[in-house]
Amino acid sequence: MTKATLVILLLICSHIVCAQEYYVLQVRGKVTFQKTGMLLKMNDVVKQSDKLVFSTESDAVAVVNAKSGRFIIKPKVSEGSSELMAIVKDILLPGTSRLSTRSGNFNNAHDIQVYFKDSVVLLSELKYKVSAAAFPMGANAFFFIRYRFNNEDINKKLVNVSDSLIIKRAELFAVDGKPIALSAASDLRLFYSKDKAITQVTNLSISTPDLTRLKAEIDILVKNMPPNTSASKLKEEVAEYLEDCYGKVSVVDFEKWYKSKQ
């Protein structure tokens, strides 16, 4: 066998191995390798032939492959068994989210309710234009968010700038000037107050990723993209990953966060 032939064979083998390996970006729920019983975790490598066992139907695993891109692995009930499991190659679902460019302009309460029906990602700051006719804002007219923390109601008046409603992560999740664990806040609701008359506008489903962990996930994603991937494509993949795994993303909020992590 010539050296050239050997090199070609090694390259082919390397390509095949690469095509069969998927790096774990995120695990939602409790997922284990059937063979070892070990819990699946971020940065693990799964192969196409691996069998994974899931604890609930809502479990999912986000993975990336340098050749074929991002995928989501979700469980299915094994034939003749109640066990939720999957062979990786049989259950890979492509990551399909696309970042919405909708700015989130609100003309009435229904617009707000529809927008926040799905989970909305808060990385740093959310900003929405609100109809002054529907919701005039000023000293005696404003929005606020109420949530439960340590069995108490916490009210957070939101910043109003002209006709814009602003939700700042650092200010929202702080009590007595001290940051709180985001998981400790529950039952988030948006209210509107005008001349001391208070109306509940909608329940809020806000996703607040751990930013340190999110950066680690993104580092794995970027590292395992094809080496010739353009900067704009990488940015697009990161945005779509957020949409797939965390919820609806504000373009302005994403742009600010993405720029800060470079």
Image (cartoon, rainbow, N blue to C red):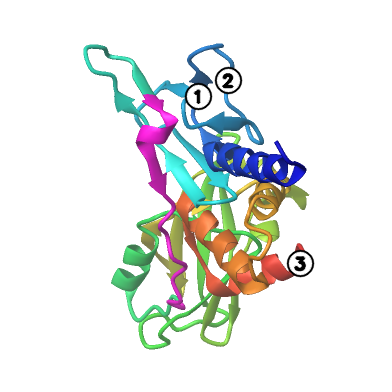
Q: How many marks?
A: 3
Say few, some or many: other residues with alpha carbon within 10 Å of mark 1 (under 14 / 14 to 19 / 20 or more).
some
Q: Nearer the viewer, residue 127 or 63?
A: 63
Task: Find the distance from the CA under tag 1 to the CA under tag 3.
Answer: 32 Å
Tell me the quadrant of the picture where the N terminus can be found: top right
Labels 2 & 1 near each other (Cβ < 8 A): yes
Tell me the quadrant of the picture where the C terminus can be found: bottom right
Say few, some or many: other residues with alpha carbon within 10 Å of mark 2 (under 14 / 14 to 19 / 20 or more).
some
Please state the extent of the stretch shown in magenta in the rendering.
86-103
Name the residue type under label 1. Answer: Lys
Give the image quarter of residue 234.
Answer: bottom right
| Residue shown at the point (64%, 40%) measured from the top left | 9
Residue on which disc 1 sits: 30
Mark 3 or 2, closer to the camera: 2
**Numbered mark located on residue 169 in the image:** none
Residue on which disc 2 sits: 39
